[in-house]
Amino acid sequence: MDTKKYVIKQISIFSENRPGRLASVAQALGEEKINILAFSIAEANGFGVIRALVDHPEEAYEKLSSLGYNVAFTDVIAVQMKDQPGGLFEIAKVLGDAEINIEYSYAYSGKTAAVLILRVDQVDDAIEKILSSGATLLEHSIFH
Amino acid sequence: MMRMFWDKKMETLNPADLKALQLKRLKKTLRSVQSVEFYRKQFDNAGVVVSDVKTLDDLQKFPFTIKQDLRDGYPFGFFAVPMRKIVRIHTTSGTTGKPTVVGYTRKDLDTWANLIARNMTMIGIGEDDIFQNMVNYGMFTGGLGFHYGAEKIGMTVIPSATGNTRRQIEMIRDFGVTTIHCTPSYAMHLSEVAEEMGETLDCLKTGIFGAEPWSDNMRRTLENRLGVTAYDSYGLSELFGPGVAFECPERDGLHIWHDSYLVEIINPKTGERLSDGERGELVVTPLVKEAMPLIRYRTGDITMLMEDGCLCGRGKKITRLSGRSDDMLIIRGINVFPSQIEHVLLRIPEVGNQFMVYIDRINHLDEMTVEVEINRSHFSGELADLAKIQKKVVKELHDTLELRTTVKLVEPGSLPRFEGKAKRVIDRRGDI
């Protein structure tokens, strides 16, 4: 199976944990008309990583790098969930049963469905299991 | 054949002739300081008489001169000649209180330039070289000191001073600069900016770095990044400035010019003289200074006289300076030199080479925090990897310093870059 088309590039931004860092990242993306679909902040001991799913990851990477930010791409997958009780359970169970570990996750609720963004330890396996369970994965082609 | 000696006779004097010359010059120096009130009083108090000096060892009866004495003599209290004989004044960076003033006669300036000429000739540079002098040209002795020495040996000198690093790099490229002089921390910054600009600076071959202690790791890093052979330069304003001691091509210790500087190594606590091979504080009696002769000046620098001779044929060497005793930090009773921190960071590729150290006293305990930049190319995007890097730095620092530190990872390029002497330590402990 061609799993590649479901691998989505999240941008991960190294950031010191101090006031104004998120504002500055958001402003830079706003200026480039890059839309942030979802983001989360992970924090440890004075520094953190801002993780964001954006509609134009390459442009976001360029822009933030040019401003001196330390940016990396991270492979994630995005699952469409039913935006209703039990929606998350279905997906989590598929992965749990397959012994696939979720390293971290965040979600957004869109107009048509909720989307769960997952960083897993076995990307290809996760894609196959999720697809064969009948759930829908977003393709990376919608981010360009 | 390339000239390797500027003043071969003086640089290779045999021990007996050297001792005789040193004694003659010492006596002259002791007589000349009689015109300085401070020394008249100090010799009286110590009950020493200049005419009693028969051998070099007799110098041990004389008291030391310390930096604070020079500060107390501000501004001209240590000048041994009338003002009309003084043709230049420099001051040292006064981090606390008043700066120290140093003066030069016309002959002093010539003597000084000749010492620098010896150093530069020793490492094989000369009139075919183009020299960019990237240090402060104002009151700091490094600028004009090297400038006149380099001109003396016929180099093409570019007095670029500090600032505008991009312009500095363009000049190196456009003028075909072969030799640079700057602080090691500025050299590191220069290499970073050159990399950003996509400049490889292939014309460079020699780097002279001084004014702050730097490690052998730093040497390898600078040599790789700039494509130079790096030489350590040592000096201090009180002894003219740069040019006191310098590495020869062996790069295993620094030759100090024994005909011009009488060297003692002492135990800094007891003042007792130490033997060759024993580490202690460098004490120097300059033998050729007119305007401001000094007796047994305590440099505060820690080194030792090396027992082995040198293949190049010059006199005894001192080991590279690990730090000034006033740079030394005492954290929970443990001695720490900022250069040790640099040494550790340079061998961890995941972090950059710039750092800042903050010392606080929290609940009566000294706490040291080291800020270091994450290396751009080692950021995986994963928080867990960052935590691993942080742990690694803490561990490596602990292994070297035997001290627990807090390590903060900061964004690349966010720490201050220094053009002159780096001030990487902020001690916030206060007085108690």
Image (cartoon, coloured by chain):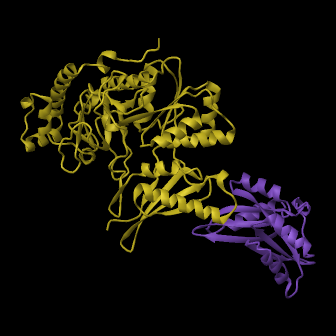
Could you tell me which residue is drawn at 63 percent across and 31 percent down? B201
- B419 or B102, nearer to the observer: B419
Does B15 sit left or right of B99 as displayed? left
> Residue at 43% of width from left, 20% of height from top?
B152
Q: Which residue ends up furthest to the top in the rendered image?
A: B1
Quarter holding the C terminus of chain B is bottom left
Where, by quadrant of the figure, is residue B47 drawn?
A: top left
Q: Nearer the viewer, residue A120 or B393?
A: A120
Residue B33 % position (x, y): 18, 33
Where residue A119 sits in the image (x, y, percent)? Answer: 76, 68
Choose top left, top right, bottom left or bottom right for residue A43. bottom right
**Residue B210: x %, y % from top left:** 43, 37
**What is the tally of numbered marks visible in this picture?**
0
Asked whether B141 or A104 is in front, the reply is A104
Q: Which residue is rendered at x = 50% and y = 17% of the image?
A: B127
Q: Colour of chain A?
A: purple
Q: Is residue B58 visible?
A: yes
**Residue A36 in sight in this render:** no
In the displayed structure image, the side of residue B352 where residue A127 appears, left or right: right
Residue B51 lies, with reference to residue B38, above or below; the image says above
Q: Name the colour assigned to chain B in the rendering.
A: yellow
Apparent side of residue B325 relative to residue B266 in the rendered image (left or right): right
